[in-house]
Image (cartoon, helix red, strand yellow):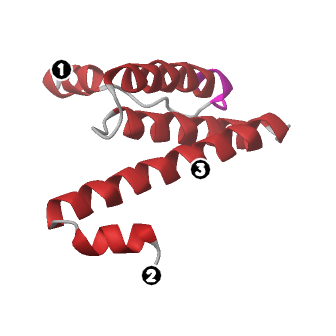
Amino acid sequence: MNSIAAGAAQATPYQAQRAALSQACHSLWLATLSLMTAFMHQPAPAHRYLLARRIANNLATLQEQECFDDQTRADFSRLSARWRRKADLLAPEGVARPAGMLTRLQRLFAR
């Protein structure tokens, strides 16, 4: 049995959950870096739009995770906003840009 498996076997359920969350966050970060690489190699605007949206969403998810320190979470937030702006610029004509919560509430109360 390797040291990681031995440590997991002795961990409390809470520690095991935190370790699993940390591993999932690490995996999501690596997947997001792969998407960024794919974005740079993809010349098709429609694909770049979809990739940018996915990257922004992944970064927003990472920003919410407590397994990162405050500075890293702030960096993820900033990067998410940057990728969301990039996706908005790449959005094809006729594609409705996603509305934020405030815009949705304003539309709801305007009815």
> Mark 3: which amino acid?
Ala
Q: Secondary structure at mark 1?
A: helix
What residue is disc 1 on?
110
Q: Position of residue 60 (x, y in %)?
A: 41, 34
Please tell me in which quadrant of the rendered image residue 8 appears.
bottom left
Question: What is the crowding at mark 3: few (fewer than 14 residues within 10 Å), some, or many (at least 20)?
Answer: some
26 vs 14, left or right, is right
**Count of marks, rendered view:** 3
- Which quarter of the image is occupied by the C terminus? top left
Residue at figure coordinates x 42%, y 67% from the top left: 4
As drawn, the label of residue 1 is: 2
Q: Residue furthest bottom?
A: 1
Nearer to us of marks 2 and 1 is 2
Q: Residues within 10 Å of mark 2 (few under 14, many from 20)?
A: few
Q: Which residues are magenta?
A: 88-93
Q: Secondary structure at mark 2?
A: loop
Q: Position of residue 78 (x, y in %)?
A: 46, 18
Mark number displayed over residue 64? none
Task: Give yes or no for contact between labels 2 and 3 (Cβ–Cβ under 8 Å).
Answer: no
Kindly state the secondary structure of the residue where label 3 is placed: helix
Circle 3 sits on which residue?
31
Q: Earlier in the sequence, mark 1 or mark 3?
A: 3
Q: Are marks 2 and 1 in contact (CB under 8 Å)?
A: no
